[in-house]
Amino acid sequence: MTILLNAENVSVHAGAEQLVEPVSLALRAGRPFTILGETGSGKSLLAQAIVGTLPDGLRASGQVTLDGHALDLARPGGHRALWGRVIGVLPQEPWLSLDPLMKARAQVAEGHALVRGLSWEDAGTAADRDLAELGLDGAGDRRPDQLSGGMAQRVAFAAARAAGARIVVADEPTKGLDVARRDDVIELLMREVREGGALLTITHDLALARRMGGDLAVVLKGRVVERGPADQVLTNPQHDYTRRLIAADPSSWPQGLRRPPKGAPVLSARDLSVTRGGKRLFEGLDIDLHPGEIVGIWGPSGCGKSTLGDILLGLAHPDRGTVTRCAGIAPVRFQKLYQDPPSAFPRHIRLGQALDDLVRLHGLNAARIPGLMERLRLSPILLSRRPTGVSGGELQRLALLRVLLLDPVFLFADEPTSRLDLITQAEVTELLSEAARETGMALLIVSHDPDLLDRTADRVISLGTAPEGDAGTPRGVPRAGGGERLRDRVALV
Amino acid sequence: MSAITTDIPVTARSGWTRTQWAGTAILMLIVAFALLAPILFPADPLRQSLRNILGGPDAASPLGYDHLGRSLTARLAAALRLSLWIAAAAVVTSAVLGMAVGVLAAWRGGWVDRLAALLADSFLALPGLLMVLIVSAIVPSTPLAFWIGLTLVLWIEYFRLTRATVSRLIVAPGVQASRLLGFGPVYIFRRHLWPELAPMLLTVAAFGAATAIMTIAALGFVSVGMRPPTPELGLMMVEMLPYYREAPMALLTPVLATFLTLLGLNLIAGGRRA
C-alpha cells in the first residue's frame, strides 16, 4: 500500500511546555488511521501540527512527507501550497464552517475554480457532479441553513476535496450528531478510503473508532499510550487507560438491575401533547414515575426530550394534558440536572458560597455536605473555586450534591453526561443511579445514547419524530430511524 | 458552613486598566479642588470688588479675578461642585430607574415589556437638550430641573442595557436552577444578574456623567441654563468671552476644568479591558 502521508517525530510546544510528545505515524492509501483521546488530550493539536494549521503561539517540530513533498514543521508556511490539492480538512461541526450566505454548489465550485484553476463554468459542472456523487442532487441551490446537519456535512466534505485532496483529516466528524447521522458520516468517510484515499480521523467517540477500523492510536495527555490495528487494540487493550476507556463505553457497562415500579407514583402525567414550532413532538403521552425508579427518555435531537422533562417539572406547559404531583411534597424536592454543568451555577460566586446560600435559605443541615462530598468523590478544595475553575464532571457531581441536599423525590437529568468524556460519563451516571436507588428519588434521565439508557434505566420512553419535510429541517433532526410517526411509551425488553 | 465560605466580595473587580486609573486620578484632582478650594481660599463667589476687576492671581485667589472682580478660584470650585452634584444625582437616579424598569420588563415580558420599550422609545425621540429645556420650563428651580431632565434622558441607556442582559440571563439554566432550588427574585438579582450588570453600569455611568456635565455647560453657554450670578462652567465661559484679550487665563480656566472632568470620565468609561 502506498504511503500518502508520513509524519516523523511530530511534537507541539507552547513556549517551554511540551503539549504533544513526539509521534510518528504513516497514512496509507485505503487504510483509515484514527486518533482516539478525550478532551484536552492533545489529539487535535497533533492533527493541526501535521496539517500546518496550529494556532498562533504554538510551535510544532518534526518532519512530514505529504505525497512526496517533504516539510519541516518547525518552519511553518510550507503547507500552504498543499492545502486543498493534497490534504484537506473536514472541520468540526462543518455547518459552522460553511459560508452561511452561499449556496452549496458555489461553495464546492470555489475549490475547483480557485485552487484547481478550472473556469467557473467547468467548476460549476464539477461541483454538481461532486454533489450528485454524495447523493445531494438538487441541493446545490440551497444555503447551509436550508440543509440538514448530515447534508451540510456532505457539502463540507465535497468542498474539502474539490481541489483533489486525497488525504482527508476529519476532526471530530461525529461531534454534535446523533446515532443515525453518525452512521452516514462513517459511510461517507469509508467511501473515501475504499476509493484509495487516506484518512486521518480524530475522535473521542469509541464507537466511531471501532467502526472505522484500520489503525488506531490512543492519546492521553499528549502522549500516544497505545497503537496498533484498531480491532486488536479495542478487543485486547494493553494499556490501563485504554482498558478503562473501553470499560467506560456504555455498551460494555454491566446490565443494571431492573426494578419493577413500587409504591405510589410521585409524579404522573396524563395525555400530554406538545407542539413546538408547528411540529407535533408527541401526543397522548402518559407517564408515571415511582420512588426509586430510573426512567430513560431516548430520541434523536429535536424530538422533545428536554421539553417533556421541563413539562413534568412545570417549567414548560403542554398544549394538552395534566401533570400531577404527589400531594404534600415541597416543590423544591422536584429538581433538575443540566446538560451544561457550568451554566447551572451562578457564574461569579464560589461554589461553596452557592451551597452556603442554599443551606441558609432552607435551613438545611450543612454537616451533611462533607459526607456527600466524599460519597460523590469530590475534593473539598473545589468549594473555594468558581464554576469556571472546575471540570465538567466535577461540576456535574457538585450539581448532583446541591440537588441531593434537598432530598429530592424526582430528578430530571437532561443529558447530564453528553458534554463529558467517556470515563467521567460512566462515573457520573453510576453515581446518579446509586443516588436514585439509595434515596428513593425517581430519576428521569435523557440521553441520545440507547446503550447508556439500556444499561441504566428500568424502562425507556422512546420519542420519535415524523420524517416529513426532511429537506428543510434544521440540522440534527433525524431522517433515518423514521417511518414511525410516533412511538410513545415503548417499554424496554 | 461558614468555614467553607470566604469573605471575598461577590463582584471582585477583575483589575482596572492603567487608562482607568489615569481617568480616576484626573477626576479625583478635580473633585479635590472643588471641595478643598473653599477651605484653602475662602471667598464668596458672588462678592464683587471693583479693585480686583480682571486681576491676576494673588494669594487669596490663585486663579485670578473676573470682570466684576469676583474670585475665580471660588467661582470655579462652586461651578464644579454644582455640575458634579447634579451629574452624580442624575446618574444615580437614572441608573436605579433604568435598571428597575429594565429588569421588570425582561422578567415579566409581555405587555410590561412592550409598554416599557414604547416609553423608552418615545423619550429617545426627543433630543436630550430639548428634554432638559422642557423640564426647566415646567420646574421652577434650575438645579432641580437639570436633575429631573437629565434623569429622563439618561435612564434609557440603563434600561436598554439591563433589559438585553437580563432577558438573556433569565432564560439561562443558571437562573432556572436557582428558581427550582427555591430562591426568590432578590437572590437571583444579587447572584445572577447584578454581577453581570455591574461592570457594564460603570461604563454607562461614566459616560452618563460626562453627558450631564456637558449638557449643563452647553445650556449655560447659550444662556438658557443656570441664571447669573450663579457660578456655572458654561456661564463662566460666556461671561469671560468678551475679555479674552485682557484676561485669557480667566477664560481658559473654566474651559480647562470642563475638559479635564470630561477627559477623566471618558478615560474611566472607555479604558475597560476588551
Image (cartoon, coloured by chain):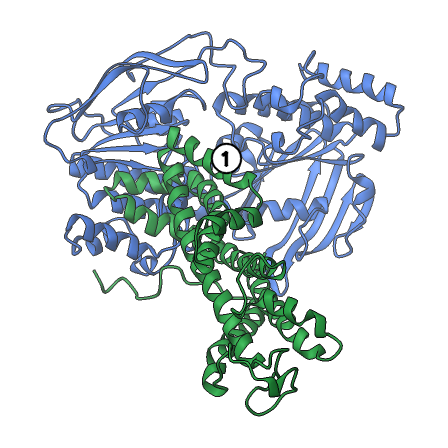
Chain colours: A blue, B green
Q: Residue furthest front?
A: B50
Residue A183 point in image, percent of width and height: 54, 22
Residue under the image location 41 percent in, 27 percent down: A449
Q: Position of residue B253 (x, y in %)?
A: 64, 75
Q: Residue A474: name its quadrant.
A: top right
Q: Position of residue A415 (x, y in %)?
A: 38, 33
Q: Can residue A421 be seen at all in this image of the molecule? A: no
Instruction: Tell me if A105 is positioned left or right of B79 in this view.
Output: right
A330 or A4, nearer to the observer: A330
> Callout 1: helix, strand or loop?
loop
Quarter of image, res A188: top right
The number of callouts visible is: 1
User: Residue at left 81%, top 19%?
Assistant: A124
Q: Quadrant of the C terminus of chain A?
A: top left
Left or right of A256 in this view: A205? right
B259 is higher (above) or lower (below) than A152: below
- Residue A298 horizontal side relative to residue B137, left or right: left
Residue hosting label 1: A205
Subunit ID for the residue under disc 1 = A
The amino acid on which the numbered mark 1 sits, given as a three-letter code, is Asp
Task: Give the percent coordinates (x, y) of residue B25.
Answer: 54, 74
* Residue A180 visible to an observer of this rendering: yes
Q: Residue at x 57, y 50 (%)?
A: B129
Name the quadrant of the N terminus of chain A.
Answer: top right
Residues A198 and B219: in front is B219
Above or below, comparing residue A390 to residue A233 in the picture: below
Furthest toward the bottom, the residue is: B59
Estimate how packed mark 1 is, as few (under 14), some (14 to 19) or many (20 or more) residues with alpha carbons within 10 Å.
some
Front position in the image: A113 or B210: B210
